[in-house]
Amino acid sequence: MRNLSIVVFILALLNTLESLSIDLYLPAFPSMEQIFQTDIGHIQISISVFFAGFAFGQLLWGPLSDRTGRKPMLYCGLLLFIVGAAAIFFTENIYVLWAMRFLQAFGGSAGIVIGRAIVIDLYDKKRSVAIFSQQSQISGIAPIIAPLLGSVFLKFWGWNSSFAFLGILGLITFFMVYKYVPETNSRASLPDTSEDEKRLKDHLRMIISNKEFISSTMIGSIAFASLIIYISNAPFLFMELHGFSSGTFSLIFGFNSLALITAAYLTPKLIKRISDIKLLLAATLLLLAACGLHILISATDLSVVLEIIMLYLSLLAIGILFPITSAHALSPFKEGRGTAAAVMGFMQLMVTFVLSGIAGLLEADSIMPMVMIRASIAVIAVWFAYHSFKSKQPSTESLGEESPQEAV
């Protein structure tokens, strides 16, 4: 049991690498403008490139981990992450920065997609929700401390010290994976190109045709998109519209981020009292209610305190949805779980790209585009959750039981 606890911690650390890679160097943007002799827009592209690398990397690592094993692919991904971070530390060329951010994300995505597959390899659906929640509690700390930690690095060691830290953390994680993480894919086999291609096609066909996978992935994608849209617009909302200082903004941002940790703590306790599918529906309804009330509060300029409360409640709902949708999307599959995790992650990022892009196009001297889009996509999440709830009613609602149709 102790060793499995260490594994859960390591998998959470792999998730944390993603958050730290996005948030840690944000305070250094003004300094990077001068170092790279460019404008802030070109520095911001490094974030977009990172998401692109993360999206496409998952399509590779998942299927490869099904074929050759989880650990070899984790090694490869972490090595690419470390190389990317080290190269960024030494560069002052904007194009090299973009390329290495893509490489860093491409490698780092292995930890996310393979980590999800390992959890499903080790645990049943009910236990998986609890494990994903535990991981969220650990990795949820990153968005709170990353900007503060990045500011300290910038002040004492310069802009590139954040990437030195990421490289060292990646190296530590590599050795922890080597020592403690077991190989959980008992079906891994020697390469056989023709068989592998057929197996991959079979897996993809099985995954795409599974209604539970599609429904859960769409709800999870909407939750992730809602989170990213909030993060992207939070500085504008609190510092420009409401005039808070950067210090006050950090406190508000940190307070709202605590909702994700609170949700991760509450979810395993809630599913002992009500079924997972009821909790899924309740969380989407909470997300819709919070986003809908945020529209009213913003339109009437009612109270910034009420805005903060609505954002907190929406993030609480999102935090509940993450572990449940991950477990529901992946647990139906006895084979091809790495591929399923890859497809799920890719869909999440693609949905986020599209919706955050729309939010960017509608950007104005108002927060209304953000709150309208978040409320609109929450309606879609409720629709998927309601149909999932209806489909479960004739059969068991217990997390620990699966119908024959679910056990593909």
Image (cartoon, rainbow, N blue to C red):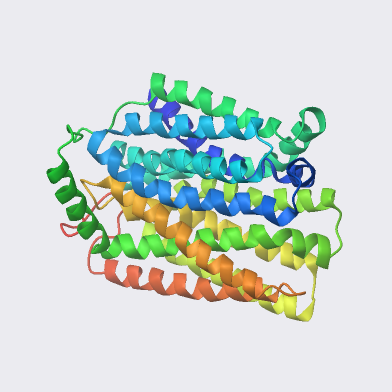
- Left or right? Give the position of 39 relative to 355: right
* Residue 381: percent from left, percent from top: 45, 69
- Left or right? Give the position of 383 relative to 320: left
**Numbered label tally:** 0
- Left or right? Give the position of 42 relative to 403: right
From this viewpoint, is residue 21 visible? yes
* Residue 259: percent from left, percent from top: 62, 52
**Residue drawn where x is 20% and y is 58% of the image:** 206
Quadrant in the rendering for residue 242: bottom right
Which quadrant of the rendered structure holds the C terminus? Answer: bottom left
From this viewpoint, is residue 275 visible? no
**Residue drawn where x is 25% and y is 53% of the image:** 332
Q: Nearer the viewer, residue 5 or 144?
A: 144
Quadrant in the rendering for residue 315: bottom right
Which quadrant of the rendered structure holds the N terminus? Answer: top left
**Residue drawn where x is 50% and y is 40% of the image:** 103
From this view, report whether residue 225 is shown above or below residue 80. below
From this view, report whether residue 396 is shown above or below residue 131. below
From this view, report whether residue 57 is shown above or below residue 360. above
- Left or right? Give the position of 282 relative to 196: right
Q: Nearer the viewer, residue 303 or 343?
A: 343
* Residue 391: percent from left, percent from top: 28, 70
Q: Nearer the viewer, residue 408 or 275?
A: 408
**Residue drawn where x is 74% and y is 46% of the image:** 29
* Residue 153: percent from left, percent from top: 75, 32
Quadrant in the rendering for residue 217: bottom left
- Which residue reaches farthest left? 195
